[in-house]
Image: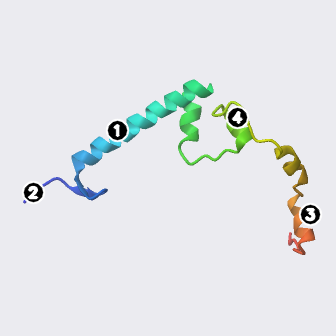
Amino acid sequence: MIQQPRVPSSGLMPASDVLIRAKEVITNRDILVELLSKHTGNSVETVANVMRRPYYMDAPKAKEFGVIDRILWRGQEKIIADVVPSEEFDKNAGIKSVV
């Protein structure tokens, strides 16, 4: 029997179906890049570069990037002010730094 090569993905699929799905994913990605670019004010290139790998943002970075309008949570400044530098934390915990 002669048939198209199949690849594992939700069961066995003909190669033509894999190609169709790949094209759909690429199209959806391009639409998402354009929408994010439009609504964040960043260039298409910037958004595409950021999306190449998982890109994690805290609230201030998300605001800077344009994916949020404002940060609703209050009290963050106090928590950040209470954070000690890593060297001081290590010293207080009895951890000796080797340089």
**Percent x, y for residue 19?**
28, 44
Q: Residues within 10 Å of mark 2 (few under 14, many from 20)?
A: few
**Percent x, y for residue 39?**
58, 26
Name the image quarter holding residue 59. top right
Q: Nearer the viewer, residue 53 or 76?
A: 76
The image quadrant where one finds the C terminus is bottom right
The residue at the point 92 percent across, 69 percent down is 91
The image quadrant where one finds the N terminus is bottom left
Q: N-terminal of the two: label 4 or label 2?
A: 2
Q: N-terminal of the two: label 3 or label 4?
A: 4
C-alpha separation, residue under disc 1 versus residue under disc 3: 52 Å
Residue 43 visible to the viewer: no
Q: Residues within 10 Å of mark 4 (few under 14, many from 20)?
A: some
Considering the numbered disc 2 on the image, is that residue within a helix, a strand or a loop? loop
The residue wearing badge 3 is: 88
Q: Which mark is residue 63?
A: 4
The residue wearing badge 2 is: 2
Q: Is residue 66 above or below residue 10?
A: above
Considering the numbered disc 3 on the image, is that residue within a helix, a strand or a loop? helix
Q: Are marks 2 and 3 in contact (CB under 8 Å)?
A: no
Name the image quarter holding residue 72. top right
Name the image quarter holding residue 76. top right
Q: Nearer the viewer, residue 21 or 10?
A: 10
Residue 48 visible to the viewer: yes
C-alpha separation, residue under disc 1 versus residue under disc 2: 27 Å
The residue wearing badge 1 is: 24
Q: Are marks 4 and 2 in contact (CB under 8 Å)?
A: no
